[in-house]
Image (spheres, rainbow, N blue to C red):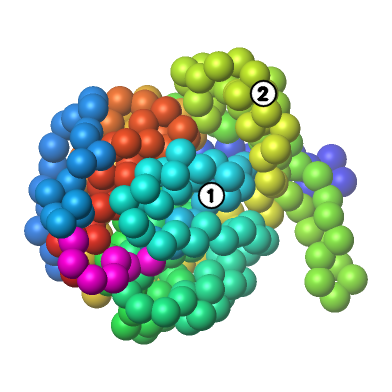
Amino acid sequence: MKTFARRAVVVAATVAVAAGALTACSQTGDHDSTQASSTSTSAVVPGVADWKGDKPTIVLVHGAWADAAGWTPVVTELQKAGFPVKAPPNPLRGLDSDAAYISGVLRQTTGPIILVGHSYGGAVITNAVAGNTQVKALVYIAAFAPDQGDSLASLNSSAQGKEIPSVPATPSSYPDTGGSTGTELTIDPGQYPNVFLDNTVAPDQQHALAVEQRPLSLAAVTGTSGAPAWKALPSWYMVAEQDHAIAPDLERFMATRAGAHTVEVEGPHLIMQTSPDAVTALIEQAAVATR
């Protein structure tokens, strides 16, 4: 059991170490990439205020060690702008099953969809579209954007994923389907504010988010991605410049590979908590560009 626990910790570390440059292995996507550096992005996007007709539904998919409530500041801004919003729970049990769950949410959503993922949620949205023609754009917020065959573990063991400290994740067991036992990973609550928030929000808010985190199954760390939706759909990407959970250079690599329209914002991994206006603006830009 000790050997298994050590192995779980090693894999957990792989999930969110950090960044370097692996441009030699870069694979360019089908869409033009527009990169810009920004520390403050206006939430007022041309084309939103004078939008005629129904707006697309924004589906927000949270990542590991978080829950849908992490999107609250962005949900508030999107609803003020007249967008219907869904923020479903991401099960965090395995990439295939999580993508299937979100795919079900998409099938039961009427009209056009802008699909947004944060962190591990980016891997989920990459695999959840499955030919759904209602999805018009993908938006990655400090997120994994895997190619076919990638896993969280392989991405974070690449050159880009080795320049930040390992995420301080602790393994524990849970009852899995069929009577088996699974392993899930939880971030040390004492380290959570530094890793996810760079100690940039009020202490009481940081501590609340730390204890409210939902653990990630080890199966989600090692599960490999299928054919990526970003090869068929336009994508937008926000790099969090002070990210301590996914290396910023790894984010840049994935954004470039996907051919995403890319912005960089000064902030931590939970960038939607610290810069909700910038996150909202990027989502709105995707909606306007694909209407």
Compute the Cα span from label 1 to label 2.
18 Å
Q: Is residue 147 visible?
A: no
In percent of the image, x 69 and y 46: which residue is there?
A: 215
Residue 140, percent from left and from top: 35, 52
Q: Is residue 280 above or below residue 257?
A: above
- Quadrant in the picture for residue 257: bottom left
Asked if residue 44 lies left or right of residue 92, the reply is: left
In percent of the image, x 41 and y 62: which residue is there?
A: 84
The stretch of residues the image draws in magenta is 51-57
Question: Badge 2: few (under 14), some or many (20 or more) residues near its Cα, within 10 Å?
Answer: some
Which of the two marks, 1 or 2, is nearer to us in this view?
2
Quadrant assignment for the C terminus: bottom left
Q: Which residue is mark 2?
A: 207
Q: Secondary structure at mark 2?
A: helix
Disc 1 + disc 2, Cβ < 8 Å: no
In percent of the image, x 51 and y 80: which residue is there?
A: 108
Q: Which residue is mark 1?
A: 63
